[in-house]
Image (tube, rainbow, N blue to C red):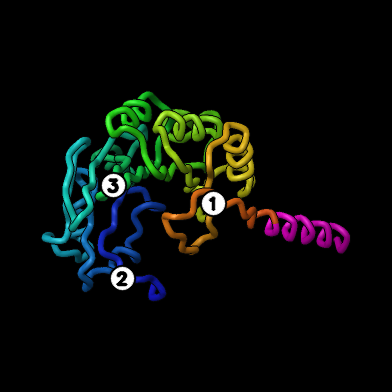
């Protein structure tokens, strides 16, 4: 975390552990960083030592401004909870971030639904859409999307560029770690949707329109070769 640039604002989608990490939040306790969160999440941050004045809490379709940027909480199809007795006690959300010339969509976690088309129409499309693209299962359709649904969401949102997220950091499902990016990349190419898939921690400018570096394939090849060597040894 010490390697991060100065962070002005952190936007939280919901309170699940892979989206709201206590150690990470407390790192910003004494910094000027502001937080924008869905309803109910503010109390968690305050409990962890974040000053109440640094946290803005919003319901769906409520907005706030930070400098020149406008942040709007928008619907998502998911759930919340960090323990046995707080399921759905706090809200989950996707987010729209509007600057003077560009609009960005961040899906958070979400199953597929008509809310993507509604949001796309309400905001007249997006320059970039960051959409969840992993940790799925056919039985989890109410809370996560399959690759074809992720691409359809990008189409519904009228996104000029699609950035797949939620596939390369945490391994929470039964599919192979690279299956989401391989599937979505293939479908996006087939549908003619520009896709940017940066490495973890890589910084890209908003001028990049279609980054086709398939960096993950080298990792797949290395992993498969390791498995072959292991099989031979055994």
Alpha carbon distance from label 3 to label 2 = 19 Å
Q: Residue at x 51, y 42 (%)?
A: 133
Describe residue 139's horizontal placement relative to residue 158 as left or right.
Answer: right
Which quadrant does the C terminus fall into? bottom right
State the residue position of label 2. 6
Secondary structure mostly seen in the magenta stretch = helix
Q: Which residues are magenta?
A: 218-234
Does dot 2 land on a helix, a strand or a loop? loop
State the residue position of label 3. 97
Q: Is residue 171 visible?
A: no
Tag 3 and tag 2, C-beta contact below 8 Å: no
Q: How many marks?
A: 3
Percent across and percent down for residue 189 are 61, 38
State the residue position of label 1. 197
Percent across and percent down for residue 134 are 52, 43
Does dot 1 land on a helix, a strand or a loop? loop
Q: Residue furthest top?
A: 114
Dividing the picture into quadrants, the one containing residue 191 is: top right
Q: Residue at x 28, y 34 (%)?
A: 123
Q: Please tell me which residue lies in front, 202 or 219.
A: 202
Q: Is residue 212 visible?
A: yes
- First in residue order: circle 3 vs circle 1: 3
């Amino acid at each position: 975390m010490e390697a991060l640039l100065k962070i002005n604002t952190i936007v939280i989608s919901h309170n699940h552990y892979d989206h709201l990490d206590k150690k990470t939040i407390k790192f910003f306790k004494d910094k000027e960083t502001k937080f924008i969160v869905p309803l109910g999440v503010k109390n968690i941050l305050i409990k962890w030592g974040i000053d109440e004045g640094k946290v803005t809490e919003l319901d769906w379709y409520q907005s706030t401004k930070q400098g020149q940027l406008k942040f709007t909480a928008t619907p998502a199809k998911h759930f919340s909870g960090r323990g046995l007795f707080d399921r759905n006690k706090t809200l989950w959300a996707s987010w729209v971030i509007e600057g003077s010339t560009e609009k960005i969509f961040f899906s958070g976690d979400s199953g597929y639904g008509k809310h993507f088309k509604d949001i796309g129409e309400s905001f007249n499309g997006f320059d970039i859409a960051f959409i969840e693209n992993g940790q799925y299962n056919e039985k989890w359709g109410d809370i996560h999307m399959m690759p074809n649904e992720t691409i359809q969401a990008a189409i519904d949102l009228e996104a000029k560029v699609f950035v797949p997220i939620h596939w390369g950091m945490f391994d929470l499902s039964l599919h192979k770690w690279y299956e989401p990016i391989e599937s979505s990349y293939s479908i996006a190419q087939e549908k003619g949707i520009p896709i940017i898939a940066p490495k973890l921690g890589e910084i890209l400018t908003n001028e990049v329109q279609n980054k086709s570096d398939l960096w993950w394939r080298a990792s797949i090849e290395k992993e498969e070769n390791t498995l072959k060597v292991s099989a031979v040894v055994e």
